[in-house]
Image (spheres, rainbow, N blue to C red):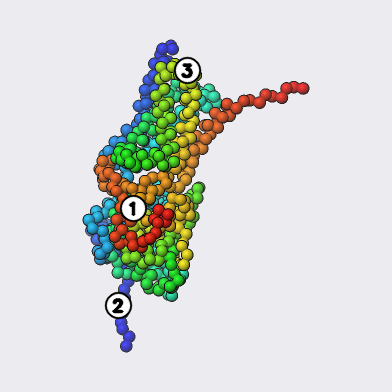
Amino acid sequence: MRVFRYPSPPPSSITPHALWLSRRDLLAAGAAAGLVGGILPSRAARAVDLAAQPGPLSGEGLKPTPLRDVTHYNNFYEFGLEKTDPAERSGDFHPRPWTVRVEGMVAKPRTYDIDALLGRKLEERIYRMRCVEAWSMVIPWIGFALRDLLAEVEPLGSAKYVAFESVVRPSEMPGQGGVLPVLDWPYVEGLRLDEAMHPLTILAVGLYGQTLPNQNGAPVRLVVPWKYGFKGIKSIVRIRLTDRQPRTSWNVRAPDEYGFYANVNPAVDHPRWSQASERPIGAGGGFFGASRQLTLPFNGYGEQVAGLYAGMDLRRDF
Amino acid sequence: MAARRGRSAGLIRLALYGIGLVPAVVSFVLGATNRLGADPVNTFERTLGLWALRFLILSLCITPLRDLTGVNLVRYRRAVGLLAFWYALFHLSAYVALDQGFDLHTLLADVTTRPFIILGMVAFTILSALAATSNGWAIRRLGRRWKALHRWVYAAAICAAIHFILSFKVIRVETLLYGLVVAALLAFRVYRAAPRRAKAPPV
């Protein structure tokens, strides 16, 4: 006997709650003004509310950085070099339609549609984010453990690393053109398989309760909270399991400044600046709002992840 | 006539200081009232450093401008040079006080181990020596040595330009352009100082 399946629309086609509400406001306003129109703000249509359970792995007592700073002060060199460029210059980027290919040393390579990823059981994870430039934020991500996705494709015993690749679209990403070569595109990143399988490692599809804005790596990005922010590759199109340590963009660009591991480590300085402390972003109050705070080993996640690196010299493998 | 000219030059100099300090005052007020973006201390530091380099470059433009166009602004050069020094001092102070919070351990490690910071400190040290000897008394006292001392401004400009280029994670067009301007201004000096080859004598 065939089982009837209720049709379930993909999340992308469901009108977000806030927009649904604002549409009523618009209708009410239109009626009040004597005109009824179906005008919808096109930008507002991008952000979609996501249902997410609070994750057990969120940090205790972390106060999230204001949404405005999370979305208007970040690095995403595909859109330009200034911290304000991602927000200002990502308006032409299309995070849909989108697929993520998971392949390489796996038994069941698969291509995931973004709707399938958004339809998974999502968790909120409030994580510290430490940029290699010595500033930091606290971001309420929404996503799922990378290990759950990897389990579905069944990594082979020979797989030792996971390589990630970002999208290349110079027509939508103005930073991929430019006069001087900044980085080799596509942006690539990598993790050791055990790092990728760690429960703290997530693929994020949202922040602050909604889908990722373009400037923060829409539609899906990596978040590894004990590593410097540049490890969190954005707008991922390919995930490949391999037996060789993958090339990573910043390491290729300046191997003496950015290592493959890039674990947050206050004891290992960047050649040009100290990593011992950090400037928290968004404290408010201008110059006198918040002073520097000490940077924690593994960004405060040492208890969970230090074991991954037992016996390694983290000054050499920085 | 000459007196009036002297007085108007004095007024212009005063106006130069007044206008020249506007970027510092404006960004200080913005930063103190939380209107300088998400990372106000960093923005403030960079703004001050950039203006120090700009005034340093302006001070180096005055001789080529005179030699190439005949416009003589030499009487304002000291004011422009001192503005460069003041901005360098503000820049350093912002780094020491606002950014590092007088953390002597970090500061000491910075100035002893990081070429990026050392270049900035060398430029600042030179500018300090030049600022300290920019008065009439020092000029008379040092005599011919004054000129030799003040040629160190070229070294300061080179250090400052490299320091600026290194202040970003990647090499930027903007920083390279500043570097090129400094290089061109120094090349002009080298060219002027080179002995002219005598024309071949008529046979």
Relative placement, left or right, of A61 versus B50 is left
- Per the rendering, the mark at residue B143 is 3
Are circles 3 and 2 on residues that touch, CB within 8 Å? no
Q: Amino acid at mark 2?
A: Tyr
Residue at mark 3 shares a chain with residue at mark 2: no
Q: CA distance from mark 3 to mark 2?
A: 95 Å
- Callout 3: residue from which chain? B
The chain holding disc 2 is: A
Q: Nearer the viewer, mark 1 or mark 2?
A: 1
Asked if residue B176 is positioned above or below residue A93 in the image, the reply reads: above
Q: Which residue is mark 2?
A: A6
**In front of the other: B179 or A14:** B179
Kindly identify which numbered label has been placed on residue B69. none
Q: Position of residue A277 (x, y in %)?
A: 32, 47
**Does label 1 or label 2 sit earlier along the sequence?**
2
Give the residue drawn at x 40%, y 28%. Answer: B128
State the residue at coordinates (37%, 72%).
A151
Q: Chain of mark 1?
A: A
| Quadrant of residue B107 within the rendered picture | top left
**Residue type (three-letter) at the residue carrying disc 1:** Arg
| Kind of residue indicated by mark 3 | Gly
- Kindly indicate the quadrant of the structure image that contains residue A300: bottom left
In 3D space, how far apart are the residues under numbered discs 1 and 2 (Cα atoms)?
A: 44 Å
Up the image or down, A253 lies above or below A13; here it is above
Graded by Cα atoms within 10 Å as few (under 14), some (14 to 19) or many (20 or more), the crowding at tag 2 reads few
